[in-house]
Image (spheres, rainbow, N blue to C red):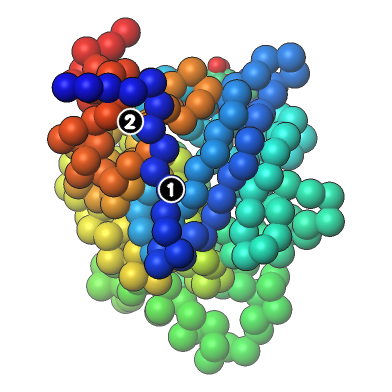
Amino acid sequence: METQDRYILTFDQNQEIALETKQLKIFYGDYQAITAADLQIPRFKITALIGASGSGKSTFLRALNRMNDGIATVHGEIWYRNLDLNTKEIDVYAMRRQIGMVFQRPNPFPKSIYENITFALERHGVTDKKELAKRVEMALRQAALWAEVKDKLNQSALSLSGGQAQRLCIARAIALQPDILLLDEPASALDPISTAQLEETLINLKEHYTIVIVTHNLPQAARISDYTAHFSKGTVIEFNDTKETFTQPRVALTNEYISGDFG
Ligand SMILES: Nc1ncnc2c1ncn2[C@@H]1O[C@H](COP(=O)(O)OP(=O)(O)OP(=O)(O)O)[C@@H](O)[C@H]1O
């Protein structure tokens, strides 16, 4: 098989782009964690970020909604709806309503299941009780948790299992009706059954949301994502349709990584 050093898919005008990074470079002090990442994230698709530990996946993901502010220095452009998010003028709080993040460990607030979802909504000005109840139900249904919790919405969220808590965190993020959901290894603390439920939830969510997910679980990336970006040493070396990436990788290092022939 003929291989290249790098292969980055770009889209034609028929594919709407939700986010695009241009020449993204990220430094922790003097250490450069991302050397140059140019990536188009297609709308209403799942894009998986894969790569060896330390290759820069989380650093890249966190830059997309400015979670690195104050931790790392980010150079380059992050385009979202004709706005460069990596500029001083951006209202980061408002932007994060459009671009939400779900973390590796489920982190529900020590409040009721219901309040976990209404908390951010109220802070964003939604106060009508009927509207809040509607949004809670919608978010829990979309996160595939409604059936399990509808009779115990006033119970503490800390009583949920890990898998349920992670779906609650997804519900909390989507209650704000964002455009894009960023997920950093959301299944790494879950058992196989909860992982399968979470994967099904994500597949259903892509009808309404653009999803970017960091995962170490390669079969998971192959199962749920439409596109895969392979990070190596701080840069994206291959970005392509997931099926192609996993069956006919164009870059030798990707082939080694997905066949477990690395490190
Ligand atoms: N807060 C930080 N301060 C300094 N260096 C950091 C910080 N966070 C990450 N790094 C470094 O940046 C590089 C990329 O880390 P990052 O967490 O983005 O990689 P990753 O691909 O997500 O790894 P993993 O799969 O292990 O989570 C690593 O060398 C890491 O040690």
Quadrant where ligand 1 appears: top right
Pick whichever, 99 or 21, lies toward us. Answer: 21
Give the residue type that dot 1 points to. Thr
Pick whichever, 138 or 159, lies toward us. Answer: 138
Lateral position of residue 88 relative to residue 230, left or right: right
State how far apart marks 1 and 2 are (Cα): 24 Å
Counting from the top left corner in percent of width and height, residue 72 is at: 71, 29
Counting from the top left corner in percent of width and height, residue 254 is at: 29, 24
Q: Which residue is mark 1?
A: 10
Q: Residue at x 41, y 37 (%)?
A: 8
Asked whether the beta carbons under mark 1 and mark 2 sit within 8 Å of each other, the answer is: no
Number of residues whose C-alpha sits closer than 10 Å to that of mark 2, classed few (under 14), some (14–19) or many (20 or more): some
Q: Is residue 85 visible?
A: yes
- The part of the image, by quadrant, that contains residue 69 is top right
The circle drawn on residue 216 is: 2
Pick whichever, 136 or 47, lies toward us. Answer: 47
Residue situated furthest front in the rendering: 2
Pick whichever, 29 or 115, lies toward us. Answer: 29
* Quadrant of the image containing the C terminus: top left
- The part of the image, by quadrant, that contains residue 201 is bottom left
Residue situated furthest right in the rendering: 89
Q: Secondary structure at mark 1?
A: loop
Q: Residue at x 45, y 64 (%)?
A: 13
Lateral position of residue 171 relative to residue 80, left or right: left
Q: Residue at x 59, y 29 (%)?
A: 36
Number of residues whose C-alpha sits closer than 10 Å to that of mark 1, classed few (under 14), some (14–19) or many (20 or more): some
